[in-house]
Image (tube, helix red, strand yellow):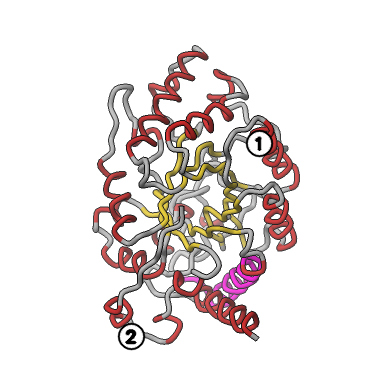
């Protein structure tokens, strides 16, 4: 369900004093190819971060809630739902005709404690069904796509022995997608995970998708979380993965794009929020500012990645940044709390970085080449 994006003359004139790249928004530039999305938090939704809100309205035509729709927040007690922030989130997206993504229905992390006390398979299945029916039903016809199941795989491609897996069994994935389809048959349904560019995990995701398809279960797309760094993954792995998932006949999305510039001495990959480490000054090399030399590397990395996205735009429906600006990023506190990271294309002062300018130039160059 694709929504029309309306750019008013007032919005354009508001930024007319900016430079060419700053006046042209991300959503305007990439709209011919795919949605440009962003994960937003409570401060954006409530209006507490006014400047962040301006960036969202100007640059993005799709929004995803960072945390407010996760189980522990939206369904904290068995007989109590908290739809307050979620209602405001959806209203914000509707106001600007954005493509609205729900995140996430079934995930082993950030789960309400009362759910984790359930040990009976039939009981947990009933609770999962009721949760999906209630949350999806609240926004039927308003949310365009849902991350139905999140991070169900181990790094070797086997199913993670998560809480849902241990109590219900591997069929919990199939059941979650079936329940979601029963609630809203017009809504797009996705599987979302990190490290899906790694061959074993990619093969595991492909297996899940093929099994669902073979059983006639609706699945519309796969979300490749883009929690990457300056050197990993290889551009070849990104491209191969986009092609491989597209060949399944589903949409491909880059769902949580950010590029860390900080060292990772434990060879840590991905985005398992349960992993934390002691603070280390050595691991926080840029506490006050990002050196130009590193900023240039970050910009080049974004340029190379967006070249691949544009090359395969016919396969990609959405690219979503995981945060509005550097100050918003969860990577400031993960895997080590208190670090200062710079993983996005807007800085802490809400200004576009080199990376922003390079991906804009990349899109302009691609557009020119196509028109020749």
Looking at the picture, does residue 304 appear above or below residue 207?
A: below
Instruction: Evaluate if marks 1 and 2 touch, with contact meaning CB atoms under 8 Å apart.
Output: no
- Residue 147 rendering spot, x and y as whole percentages: 50, 42
Looking at the picture, does residue 4 appear above or below residue 268?
A: below
Q: Which mark is residue 266?
A: none
For the residue labelled by badge 2, is the local secondary structure a helix, a strand or a loop? loop
**Residue at the disc numbered 1:** 213
**Residue at the disc numbered 2:** 16
- Residue 51 rendering spot, x and y as whole percentages: 29, 67
Q: Quadrant of residue 134?
A: top left
For the residue labelled by badge 1, is the local secondary structure a helix, a strand or a loop? helix
Give the dominant element type of the magenta stretch: helix, strand or loop.
helix
Q: What span is in magenta?
A: 289-309
Q: CA distance from mark 1 to mark 2?
A: 49 Å
Looking at the picture, does residue 16 appear above or below residue 48?
A: below
Return the residue nearer the eye: 370 or 343: 370
Return the residue nearer the eye: 284 or 50: 50
Image point (66%, 47%), residue name = 196
Mark 1 vs 2, N-terminal side: 2
Q: Quadrant of residue 167?
A: top right
**Tag in front: 1 or 2:** 1
Looking at the picture, does residue 355 appear above or below residue 211?
A: below
- Residue 364 rendering spot, x and y as whole percentages: 56, 81
Does 269 sit left or right of 322 as displayed?
Answer: right
């Amino acid at each position: 369900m694709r929504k029309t994006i309306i750019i008013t003359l007032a919005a354009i004139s508001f930024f007319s004093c900016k430079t060419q790249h700053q006046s042209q928004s991300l959503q305007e530039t990439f709209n011919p190819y795919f949605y440009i999305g962003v994960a937003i938090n409570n401060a954006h939704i409530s209006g507490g971060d006014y400047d962040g809100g301006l960036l969202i309205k100007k640059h993005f035509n799709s929004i995803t809630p960072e945390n407010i729709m996760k189980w522990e927040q939206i369904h904290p007690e068995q007989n109590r739902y908290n739809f307050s922030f979620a209602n405001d989130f959806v209203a914000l997206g509707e106001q600007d005709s954005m493509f609205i993504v729900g995140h996430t229905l079934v995930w082993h992390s950030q789960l309400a404690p009362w759910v984790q006390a359930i040990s009976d398979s039939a009981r947990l299945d009933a609770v999962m069904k009721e949760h999906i029916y209630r949350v999806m039903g609240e926004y039927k016809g308003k949310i365009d796509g849902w991350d139905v199941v999140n991070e169900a795989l181990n790094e070797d491609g086997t199913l993670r022995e998560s809480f849902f897996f241990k109590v219900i069994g591997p069929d919990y994935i199939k059941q979650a997608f079936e329940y979601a389809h029963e609630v809203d048959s017009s809504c797009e349904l996705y599987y979302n995970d990190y490290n899906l560019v790694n061959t074993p995990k990619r093969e595991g995701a492909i297996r899940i998708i093929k099994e669902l398809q073979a059983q006639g279960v609706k699945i519309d797309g796969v979300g490749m979380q883009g929690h990457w760094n300056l050197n990993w993954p290889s551009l070849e792995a990104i491209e191969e993965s986009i092609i491989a998932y597209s060949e399944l006949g589903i949409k491909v999305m880059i769902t949580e794009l950010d590029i860390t510039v900080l060292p990772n001495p434990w060879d840590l990959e991905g985005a398992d929020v349960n992993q934390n480490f002691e603070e280390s000054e050595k691991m926080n090399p840029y506490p006050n500012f990002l050196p130009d030399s590193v900023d240039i590397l970050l910009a080049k990395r974004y340029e190379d990645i967006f070249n691949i996205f544009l090359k395969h735009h016919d396969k990609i429906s959405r690219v979503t940044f995981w945060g509005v600006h550097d100050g918003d990023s969860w990577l400031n506190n993960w895997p080590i709390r208190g670090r200062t990271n710079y993983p996005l294309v807007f800085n802490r002062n809400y200004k576009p970085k080199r990376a922003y300018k390079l991906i804009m130039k990349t899109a302009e160059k691609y557009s020119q080449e196509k028109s020749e």
